[in-house]
Every structure is written in structure tokens, then in C-alpha cells.
Image: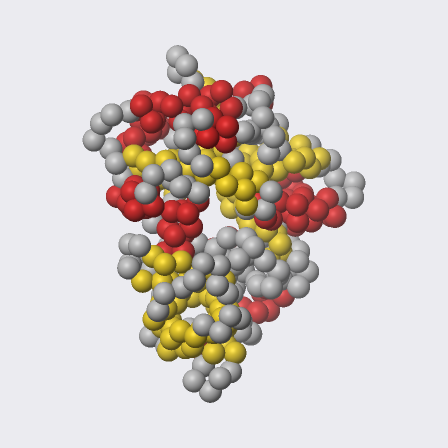
């Protein structure tokens, strides 16, 4: 299967040639906007949207001990992962803090771990740190792979235009090779945050270009749009999706980030297990990730701390956006446990002197 992936993962020139503006974020290139943000967001909620997520961190793992090794150092059950299966797992420090979160994909002869780009180097170093006699090789694979994400309520039927009914034969969290007259790629079937099917399409550059072109040329009843990083960032905040480095970093643990569903408490030891279990057993979790609504407009890249009525610092806003769909500014924040009840009133203060009233909300903002 590895013979499929042969060319560098760079679709940016292809997308730029179609008139889309390229932006550089922390050294890697993305498209922030393809059309209007409103149209792109509407595709995610009511139609179908395609994202180029080749800028995500892609790590290739090889060796006969990979699954056993990852099972011992990460939070989820890995040892039973069979060929063509995929799962999400976390890496945590010996203090139970978050190192990285990502999806492991099992190709049998090798595995891919896909995580936030900002987590990649930290995760690679963390894995290498614990390799002693294990047969495990760790490689940066972003130059080998292209990854597209198709999501939205129409994604399931839209992808059948390209793949046919084989889509219905793929179980969630597994993949198949799709080969048509002019396309060859891996189709990975997943669930999105709203419980609907979404798909990752893994291929080389030539096939990724053809996939994008075929979707752009389709003229039918589907509400299809390419989705840029600006629209997705707004969507992911509305859905309460944490990302690195904003919400996922070593200042926080999986309890605080509400990621306990990716920890198998029955599988035995992993790095950080004792601390994470003790936090749960003795109810020692001090803060949680929650949503906040701002009473007033936000300035771009503004950073806020949260205070109670007595002027005590009770939290930090980690992501914020002026939501078009909700017609209000919203954010994600880590807030002390006593102030996480829905409707709680707090004050947000920025380093620049901006001060806004905020209201605590449950996540997601939009169901």
C-alpha cells in the first residue's frame, strides 16, 4: 500500500494557481479563505466542505514493536488495533499534562500518527525519548503525504459521487483503498464532532489535485465549498474543538480539556496514568474547558484573562472569534471549577486595556 504515496505533499501551488491567496502561519502555508466565510461555514453546517489539511503534523512509524510500544506510553488501547483501523490517543507527561493528541492509522506494515502541526515536533521527541530496545522508527512524513478532509451533513452522499456504494461498506474508523479510472487514494471514514460521517482522503499530490478538481467541477444540488482556515477556526470554536497550542498544551491535563473519552482506564499503565487517575479519584480537577460569550466586539488576536466580581483571576481565554452564525463574539476558556456553571458572569480583561463582560456557556455553542 505504501507505493501509493510517492510525491511531496504540496497542494498550495495548485490552489494558488486557481486564484486563492496563500498565507503563512508559523512557517507553513495555508489558504485562509476561498470564497466568503459565510458560504464556507454554511457548507460545514448544512452542506459539504473540503479542507486541505496537509499542513497537519504527519508522523510515520515503522517497526514490529510500534503498536505495543504506543500502547504502553499513550492513553488509549492501541495493541488491538487491526489492519485498516484508526483511533485517537493522547500522549501525557509524567505529571499528567498534555503533550499531544492525534489519530493513529494502522497500515499494518507502518502506521501514521496525525496531530496538530504545532504538536508534531514535541510528539516526535516524546516518542523517541522512550524508545530503548524497541523496534520503532519515527519519521517526519509531511513531505510524503497529502491529506484532505470532507465534512458536513452532505459529505456521506457527496463522496459516493466519486467512490460509489463502496462508501457504505466502510465501517467508521476504518479505511479502504479507492481506485477508479483516474483516481487512487485511501478513504478513511470517521465521525465528526456532530456525530455525522466525515472523511479523510490520503493520497499523493497528483491524485489530490484530481480529487479537488473533480469536486470543484461538480455541478449539482450539493452545497459544496472549499473551506479555509478562517471559516474552520470559527466552526471549531462554535463546536468546542480544542487545538494546539491554544487549548492543548502542557499547562493542562485531559480532565481539564474534557478528553477523558480518549483514555482507557482498563488497559493498565501509561505515562502520566497515576496523576490522571488520582485527579479523578479524589476530585482534584481545578479547572475545565468551557465556552464564553462576550458582551462587545473583539479585536483581532486579543488575549484575555477572566476575573470574578471580586477581581480575582479565575481563568484564561484560549481562543476567540466574532461568530458570524451566532452574531456575537464567543471563545473557549479554561475556567476554575467554581465558575463553570452555565450563565455565570465574569469580566474579561485584555493586556491592551479592553474590558468586556462575559457569560459562561456550555459546549458546543451550536448543536
Q: How is the image coloured?
A: secondary structure
Q: Residue at x 55, y 45 (%)?
A: 25
184 displayed left or right of 56: left
Question: Residue at position x 54%, y 53% from top?
Answer: 244
Q: Residue furthest toward the top?
A: 181
Looking at the picture, tell me which residue is in the foreground, 126 or 218. Answer: 218
Q: Quadrant of residue 179?
A: top left
Return the residue nearer the eye: 127 or 354. Answer: 354
Identity of the residue drawn at 52% across and 78% down: 313
Q: Is residue 70 above or below residue 214?
A: below
Image mark count: 0
Q: Residue at x 42, y 66 (%)?
A: 290
Q: Quadrant of the N terminus?
A: top right
Q: Is 270 or 43 nearer to us in this picture?
A: 43
Pick the front one: 350 or 256: 350
Is any atom of residue 258 visible in this view? no
Percent from the top left, x then y, of residue 203? Answer: 50, 25
The location of residue 257, given as percent across then percent down, is: 50, 61
* Extreme-left residue of the structure: 221
Which residue reaches farthest right?
133
Side of 172 where 314 appears, left or right: right
- The x, y position of residue 214, in whole percent, is 35, 22
Q: Looking at the rendering, which quadrant does residue 212 occupy?
A: top left
Residue 35 seen in the current view? yes
Q: Is residue 32 left or right of residue 325?
A: right
Q: Quadrant of the C terminus?
A: bottom left
From the top left corner, tell me how far across and down residue 320 is, in percent.
Answer: 43, 60
Amino acid at each position: 500500500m505504501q507505493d501509493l504515496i510517492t510525491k511531496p505533499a504540496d497542494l498550495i501551488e495548485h490552489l494558488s494557481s486557481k486564484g486563492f491567496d496563500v498565507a503563512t502561519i508559523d512557517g507553513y502555508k495555508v489558504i485562509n479563505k476561498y470564497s466568503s466565510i459565510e458560504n464556507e461555514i454554511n457548507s460545514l453546517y448544512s452542506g459539504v466542505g473540503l479542507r486541505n489539511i496537509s499542513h497537519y503534523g504527519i508522523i510515520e512509524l515503522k517497526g514490529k514493536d510500534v503498536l505495543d510500544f504506543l500502547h504502553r506510553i499513550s492513553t488509549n488501547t492501541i495493541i488491538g488495533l487491526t489492519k485498516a483501523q484508526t483511533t485517537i490517543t493522547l500522549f501525557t507527561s509524567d505529571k499528567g499534562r498534555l503533550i499531544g493528541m492525534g489519530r493513529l492509522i494502522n497500515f499494518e506494515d507502518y502506521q501514521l500518527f496525525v496531530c496538530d502541526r504545532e504538536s508534531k515536533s514535541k510528539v516526535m521527541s516524546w516518542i523517541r525519548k522512550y524508545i530503548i530496545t524497541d523496534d520503532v522508527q519515527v519519521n517526519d512524513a509531511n513531505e510524503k503525504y497529502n491529506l484532505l478532509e470532507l465534512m458536513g451533513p452532505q459529505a456521506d452522499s457527496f463522496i459516493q459521487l466519486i467512490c460509489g456504494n463502496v462508501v457504505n461498506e466502510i465501517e467508521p474508523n476504518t479505511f479502504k483503498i479507492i481506485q477508479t479510472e483516474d483516481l487512487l487514494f485511501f478513504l478513511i471514514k470517521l465521525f465528526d464532532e456532530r456525530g455525522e460521517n466525515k472523511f479523510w482522503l490520503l493520497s499523493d499530490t497528483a491524485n489530490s489535485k484530481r480529487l479537488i478538481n473533480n469536486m470543484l467541477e461538480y455541478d449539482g444540488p450539493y452545497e459544496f465549498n472549499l473551506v479555509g482556515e478562517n471559516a474552520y477556526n470559527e466552526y471549531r470554536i462554535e463546536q468546542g474543538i480544542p487545538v494546539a497550542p491554544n487549548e492543548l498544551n502542557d499547562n493542562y491535563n485531559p480532565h481539564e480539556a474534557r478528553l477523558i473519552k480518549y483514555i482507557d482506564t482498563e488497559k493498565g499503565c501509561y505515562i502520566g496514568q497515576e496523576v490522571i487517575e488520582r485527579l479523578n479519584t479524589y476530585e482534584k480537577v481545578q479547572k475545565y474547558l468551557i465556552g464564553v460569550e462576550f458582551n462587545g466586539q473583539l479585536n483581532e488576536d486579543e488575549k484575555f484573562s477572566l476575573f470574578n466580581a471580586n477581581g480575582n483571576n479565575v481563568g484564561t481565554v484560549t481562543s476567540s472569534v466574532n461568530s458570524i452564525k451566532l452574531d456575537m463574539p464567543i471563545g473557549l476558556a479554561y475556567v476554575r471549577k467554581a465558575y463553570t456553571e452555565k450563565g455565570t458572569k465574569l469580566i474579561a480583561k485584555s493586556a491592551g486595556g479592553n474590558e468586556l463582560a462575559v457569560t459562561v456557556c456550555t459546549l458546543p455553542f451550536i448543536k
